[in-house]
């Protein structure tokens, strides 16, 4: 439908300057005031400045997202998934029977939705009355067409005799005469019916004819019995003919040819009675009989009573060719359409019906796509037809180009529908289900769209991660974790940021955060988020810096617990393994001071050598770089300001450490020497 | 089994569902809260107990719009309940219904923005626990907030109770709460202690698996059961030590809620984001234990969940319905009826669950 629609955006600046718009991911536009700038335009504030500029967000109003139809979206997605599972598990066996159930389920869902829409629309105070009515019309049509589609393509009818199902379809969707008949049958005439006959009811004959046309002969007989002359001979004959009319039933146990014979016999008998003038005394009955023997003139007279060409066609076939094959429908359809004013007077939904009868499924889908229910119908129906193999048959006798496009057609429709759902704040999980079944492009689309979803709370983020993880989209998981981590970091929640970094094993980010922790420690002399750092476990192995941070916290834990020897070993190993960042060495050496100076000898001579070694290495480099114990460059400036102070402080510290190292070395050597001696003595004594 | 399931489509993803507790009689009203919608709703549903008539579905008897995603619902008595949401607030609401099929929800008290960021702005409140009129709330800010239904001012805030987001909380005693965080660190807090330090800390598992829900045994409050983000169930006996007694890998994805049957604690119900809802039955074990068929290995008064080896091989697990394609977010049990709320925007009620 090439209808253009204009929307006015109330914005003064836009009106004066002109405007431009940019697509947002999925279905949104950002419109703003804009004036084109070229190489020749002057670089100055525009004449509109200063002004309040606005960016307008525009999005499609998707009818399908109405609260009532949302239930349909969710319910049908369950059926859709069940259908896909069915196909996947079938392993090539015939599952038409199962697919018929799926099709019926879809229709039941639409019917339930219709009911909800109608009850909502019937509420007087309902604000959404109009939209509900509009939706009700749309979904009524959907169900109507889906039903025919089911009869013609999904249901497997042995012998291809479609008329019984076709009649069911007509009866289901035009209940006018049935209701009238009901009204007459349980009518308030009471005894007057018995006295005067029901024929006094104005719609009596109309109703009878209507019932006959729809093949509801039981109803018609019941009505005729209410006629005051129902016991007369013509009525008895009609009743007999109606009662004996054979109806074809696949499971009736008779073959098609045998049925045809019986049916012909029945009609001949009726025609004979008609010609013999049995009904001549009763014009109405004669007319009904004419219809039942398939008199073309009589049928032309009831054209208006049928209402639509397809009802006319069904009635006509019922009394002329009850075993019509589905491929003949196209011919009969065109015949009947011609009687109703030709193809040019058909409505959109009629065109779909014609296309269905012509077996032109591509045309059907193309027409359906133009109906305004946002692709729900097209996507689900095409998917179902695809699984029934109807689209494949089509490919065989079409050119190779359309053959490949038939496969794509289903996928394209699912892709569109899924993408539409993904654009909704809350329905993204449903959308993904559909994209999952687009083998060619689905995955790429999921990847692209998942990243555009706003993350919101952690619960929501975790749900998105779950969806990504289920599909092995690890890079998306990583990037969501990174975003969540960065967000926590910006909110000054380092602990939580680190948790997110660890979740995705993000070494770079973990290192960065570990540095931040160390920097804060240097500034404040205490650690943040100790509950986290003390319990890192094996996670600390993600990055060297984090390992160091974890171990350093462990050192403090040990130290506070009074386990000096263990603490000392850990400290020395941190330095010896070069795990500690250089800038932190001075802090570590300072931490060693109390251990060096303790009464008991905690550090062995070898440990002391390691420390000395580290000290020399640090000082050797320290001549041309800053050793003040900073990590971030942002602190450099402040350090330079107080460089004199700091330098003298560092020198003081170095002196103290050297002294402590020297003393400890002396003590430990002495002690170790003694131990050695005693050990040797022990050896001598033993030998 | 399926014919006992009644599903209703709500039109909003359901984040929490709770039966309205009733004294003595069976509850016929439940409450749902939604999430991930522009405006979320609290919805009251009527589901009258019916014997054979299978075609009575739950119907709405009241709705109430609510700001933010609803993260937890807890009743404090038969018609007052507390709600937490992602805008960092906790509210106390009352069911105001004079007629049986028309009810209104009225706000009684509101604790706004009790979970907030140091840099400004609110942050989701992730969980609630109630003990009579005491309410404790936890949030993504790692803060623990103690409230009481009687006053507007929070009784106590433990700022920085955790450096990570807190995900779940439950009361162990009137003065003890247990919290679980995003990386599976569990902390026990003694609320009488004025120092803002946990009484004890332990991990859900060796890996950094977040704790998604936690509950205690209805009669033996020292027994704590936690569900993890990887779908595991972990059991602790807090009397003895803080190492897990039993670790079961259960669901294939995060356990979203677990609940013991309030009157029949040998039954446990769990649901998961993988779309599973399970009924764990340990009564056959206790029965055989009482009969003395397992004399030596199974002490009579021992809780079955705490006896890891036996439990692992003897648990009877039933699925209440075929696996859904969407997460099941919440469940609640009342007598022999279970209700669950899911991300496919439906609530399912199971009646006549065999206990």
Image: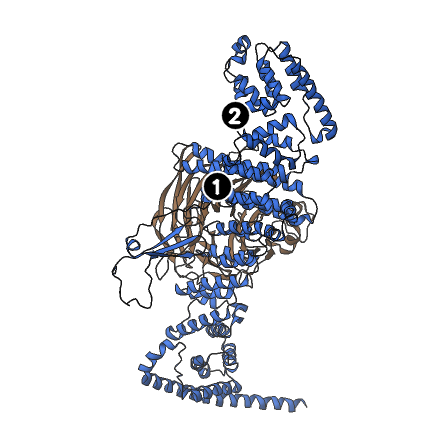
- Chain B rendering hue: brown
Q: Is residue A282 visible?
A: yes
On the image, the x and y values in percent for residue A527 come to 42, 70
For the image, the number of numbered tags is 2
Asked whether, in this view, residue A234 is left or right of residue A659, the answer is: right
Q: Which residue is drawn at 55% across and 32% down?
A: A338
Circle 2 SS class: helix
Q: Considering only vertical position in the picture, is A414 above or below A151?
A: below
| First along the sequence among labels 2 and 1 | 1
Q: Which part of the image, by quadrant, shows the C terminus of chain A?
A: bottom right
The disc placed on residue B132 is: none
The foreground one among B115 and A386 is A386
Circle 1 SS class: helix
Q: Which residue is drawn at 62% across and 13% down?
A: A279
Q: Which chain carries label 1?
A: A
- Chain A rendering hue: blue
On the image, the x and y values in percent for residue A344 come to 51, 36
On the image, the x and y values in percent for residue B267 come to 58, 45
The disc placed on residue A69 is: 1
- Cα separation, mark 2 vs mark 1, equals 35 Å
């Amino acid at each position: 439908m090439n209808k253009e629609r204009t929307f006015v955006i109330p914005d003064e600046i836009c009106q004066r300057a002109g405007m431009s718009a940019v697509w947002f991911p999925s279905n949104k536009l950002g419109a703003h005031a804009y004036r084109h700038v070229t190489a020749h335009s002057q670089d100055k504030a525009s004449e509109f400045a200063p002004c309040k500029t606005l960016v307008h967000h525009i999005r499609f109003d998707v009818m399908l997202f109405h609260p009532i139809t949302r239930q349909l979206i969710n319910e049908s997605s369950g059926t859709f998934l069940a259908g896909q599972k069915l196909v996947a598990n079938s392993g090539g066996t015939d599952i038409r029977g199962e697919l018929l159930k799926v099709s019926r389920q879809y229709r039941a869902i639409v019917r339930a939705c219709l009911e909800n829409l109608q009850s909502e629309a019937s509420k007087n105070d309902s604000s959404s009355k109009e939209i509900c009515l509009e939706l009700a019309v749309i979904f009524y049509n959907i169900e109507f067409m889906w039903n025919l589609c089911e009869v013609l393509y999904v249901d497997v009818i042995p012998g291809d005799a479609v008329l019984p199902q076709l009649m069911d379809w007509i009866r289901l969707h035009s209940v006018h005469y049935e209701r009238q008949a009901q009204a007459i049958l349980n009518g308030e005439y009471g005894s007057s019916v018995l006295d005067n006959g029901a024929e006094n009811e104005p719609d009596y004959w109309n109703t009878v004819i209507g019932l006959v046309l729809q093949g509801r002969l039981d109803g018609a007989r019941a009505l005729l019995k209410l006629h005051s002359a129902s016991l007369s001979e013509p009525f008895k004959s009609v009743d007999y003919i109606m009662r004996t009319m054979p109806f074809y039933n696949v499971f009736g146990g008779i073959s098609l040819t045998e049925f045809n014979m019986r049916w012909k016999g029945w009609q001949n008998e009726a025609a004979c009675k008609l010609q013999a003038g049995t009904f001549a005394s009763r014009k109405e009955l004669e007319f009904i009989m004419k219809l039942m023997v398939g008199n073309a003139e009589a049928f032309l007279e009831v054209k208006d009573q049928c209402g639509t060409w397809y009802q006319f066609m069904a009635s006509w076939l019922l009394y002329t060719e009850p075993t019509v094959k589905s491929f003949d429908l196209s011919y009969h359809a065109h015949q009947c359409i011609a009687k109703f004013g030709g193809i040019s007077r058909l409505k959109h939904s009629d065109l779909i019906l014609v296309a269905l009868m012509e077996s032109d499924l591509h045309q059907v889908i193309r027409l359906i796509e133009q109906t305004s229910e946002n692709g729900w119908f097209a996507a689900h129906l095409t998917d179902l037809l695809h699984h029934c193999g109807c689209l494949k048959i089509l490919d065989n006798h079409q050119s190779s180009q359309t053959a490949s496009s038939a496969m794509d057609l289903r996928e394209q429709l699912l892709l569109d529908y899924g993408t539409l759902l993904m654009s909704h704040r809350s329905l993204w999980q449903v959308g993904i289900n559909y994209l999952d079944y687009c083998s060619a492009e689905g995955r790429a689309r999921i990847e692209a769209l998942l990243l555009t979803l706003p993350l919101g709370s952690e619960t929501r983020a975790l749900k998105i991660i779950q969806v990504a993880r289920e599909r092995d989209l690890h890079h998306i998981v990583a990037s969501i974790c990174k975003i969540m981590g960065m967000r926590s970091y910006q909110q000054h929640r380092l602990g939580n940021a680190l948790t997110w970094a660890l979740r995705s094993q993000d070494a770079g980010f973990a290192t960065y955060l570990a540095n931040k922790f160390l920097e804060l420690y240097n500034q404040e002399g205490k650690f943040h988020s100790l509950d986290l750092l003390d319990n890192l476990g094996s996670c600390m192995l993600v990055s060297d810096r984090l390992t160091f941070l974890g171990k350093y916290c462990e050192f403090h834990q040990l130290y506070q617990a009074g386990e000096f020897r263990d603490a000392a070993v850990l400290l020395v190993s941190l330095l010896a393994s070069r795990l500690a960042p250089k800038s932190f060495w001075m802090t570590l050496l300072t931490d060693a001071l109390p251990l060096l100076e303790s009464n008991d000898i905690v550090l062995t001579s070898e440990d002391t050598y390691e420390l000395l070694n580290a000290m020399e290495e640090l000082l050797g480099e320290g001549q041309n770089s800053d050793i003040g114990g900073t990590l971030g460059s942002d602190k450099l400036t402040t350090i330079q300001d107080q460089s004199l102070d700091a330098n003298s402080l560092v020198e003081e510290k170095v002196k103290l450490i050297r002294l402590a190292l020297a003393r400890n070395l002396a003590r430990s050597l002495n002690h170790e020497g003694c131990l050695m001696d005693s050990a040797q003595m022990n050896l001598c004594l033993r030998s | 089994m399926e014919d006992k399931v009644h599903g209703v489509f709500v039109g909003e993803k359901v984040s929490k569902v709770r039966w309205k507790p009733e004294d003595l009689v069976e509850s016929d009203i439940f409450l749902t809260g939604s999430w991930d919608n522009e405006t979320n709703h609290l919805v009251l549903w009527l589901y009258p107990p019916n014997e054979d008539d299978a075609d009575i579905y739950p119907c709405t008897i009241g709705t109430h719009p609510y700001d933010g995603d609803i993260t937890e619902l807890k009743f404090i008595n038969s018609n007052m309940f507390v709600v937490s949401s992602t805008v960092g607030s906790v509210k106390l609401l009352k069911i105001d219904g004079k007629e049986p099929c028309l009810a209104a929800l009225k706000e009684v008290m509101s604790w706004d923005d009790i979970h907030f960021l140091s840099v400004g702005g609110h942050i989701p409140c992730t969980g609630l626990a109630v003990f009579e009129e005491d309410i404790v709330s936890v949030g993504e800010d790692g803060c623990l907030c103690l409230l009481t239904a009687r006053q507007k001012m929070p009784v106590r805030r433990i700022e920085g109770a955790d450096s990570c987001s807190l995900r779940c909380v439950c009361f162990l005693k009137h003065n003890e709460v247990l919290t679980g965080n995003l990386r599976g660190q569990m902390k026990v807090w003694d609320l009488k202690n004025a120092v803002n330090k946990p009484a004890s800390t332990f991990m859900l598992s060796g890996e950094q698996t977040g704790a998604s829900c936690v509950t205690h045994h209805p009669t033996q409050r020292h027994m704590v059961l936690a569900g993890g983000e990887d779908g595991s169930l972990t059991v602790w006996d807090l009397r003895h030590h803080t190492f897990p007694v039993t670790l079961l890998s259960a669901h294939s994805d995060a356990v979203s809620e677990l609940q013991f049957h309030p009157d029949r604690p040998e039954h446990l119900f769990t649901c998961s984001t993988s779309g599973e809802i399970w009924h764990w039955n340990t009564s056959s074990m206790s029965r055989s234990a009482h009969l003395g068929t397992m004399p030596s290995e199974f002490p009579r008064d021992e809780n079955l969940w705490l006896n890891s080896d036996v439990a692992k091989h003897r648990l009877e697990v039933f699925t209440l319905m075929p696996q859904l394609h969407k997460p099941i977010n919440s469940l609640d049990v009342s007598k022999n009826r279970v209700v669950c709320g899911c991300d496919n925007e439906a609530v399912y009620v199971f009646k006549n669950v065999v206990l």
